[in-house]
Image (spheres, rainbow, N blue to C red):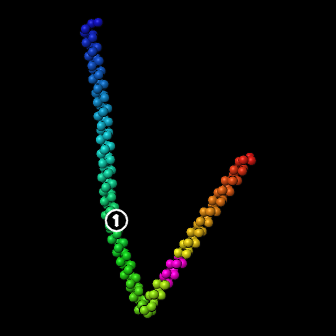
Amino acid sequence: MDPVSGAKAAAGTLKGAQSAGKELGSVVTSQQVDMEALVQQQHKARVQAKLAEQRRATMLEVRAVEKYEQQKAHEREIEKLKQDTIRKHGKTAWTDVEAVKAKMERERQEELKYMDKDRARQIQVFYWCLTAAAAVTYLLKLYK
């Protein structure tokens, strides 16, 4: 073997190894860039979620204040209604109004109870029909 050709072969091998090393380095660098982009994306998502939570908490306080004001306005309206009723119909009129209100609430609760029973019956009928249809289908398949 000629020493010059051996040196050339060794140089070629070294150049190939150097090229492979550069490609491998390029792959590693690309992977690191992708990983860093993912980390940055997750960081951005966490920051946005935190800001959204802060906005929601702030808005919750605003809504709580609005609800409080509505309750106070409702209480004032009820008090005004009470005073007007007492003035027009006498001292015991408001007690009568509260009795009528309680009766109306009981009737509403009773009607809701009946509605729930009706729903339960409809669901029960549906499942009975479903069972019957399944049985008929099974029998038709069985004796076909």
Relative to 64, is 136 above or below? above
Q: Residue at x 49, y 84 (%)?
A: 99
Q: Based on the displayed image, in which of its 4 quarters is residue 49 positioned?
A: bottom left
> In the visual, does 130 lie left or right of 23?
right
> Which amino acid type corresponds to the residue marked 1 in the rendered image?
Leu
The spot of residue 138 in percent (x, y) is 69, 50
Outermost residue on the right side: it is 143
Relative to 39, is 104 above or below? below
Tell me the crowding category of disc 1: few under 14, some 14 to 19, or many 20 or more residues within 10 angstroms, Cα based: few
Which image quadrant: the N terminus?
top left
The spot of residue 89 in percent (x, y) is 45, 92
Q: Based on the displayed image, in which of its 4 quarters is residue 14 positioned?
A: top left
The spot of residue 98 in percent (x, y) is 46, 84
Relative to 74, is 91 above or below? below
Q: Is residue 94 at all visible to an observer of this figure?
A: yes
Q: Is residue 107 magenta?
A: yes
| Nearer to me, 45 or 109 | 109
> In the visual, does 138 lie left or right of 102?
right
Q: Is residue 88 at all visible to an observer of this figure?
A: no
> In the visual, does 88 lie left or right of 108?
left
Q: Based on the displayed image, in which of its 4 quarters is residue 78 positioned?
A: bottom left
Check disc 1 and report the residue beneath it: 60
Q: Secondary structure at mark 1?
A: helix
Relative to 35, is 100 above or below? below
| Nearer to me, 42 or 96 | 96
Label the magenta part by its dominant secondary structure. Answer: helix
Q: Residue at x 72, y 50 (%)?
A: 140
Magenta extent:
100-108
The spot of residue 48 in percent (x, y) is 31, 53
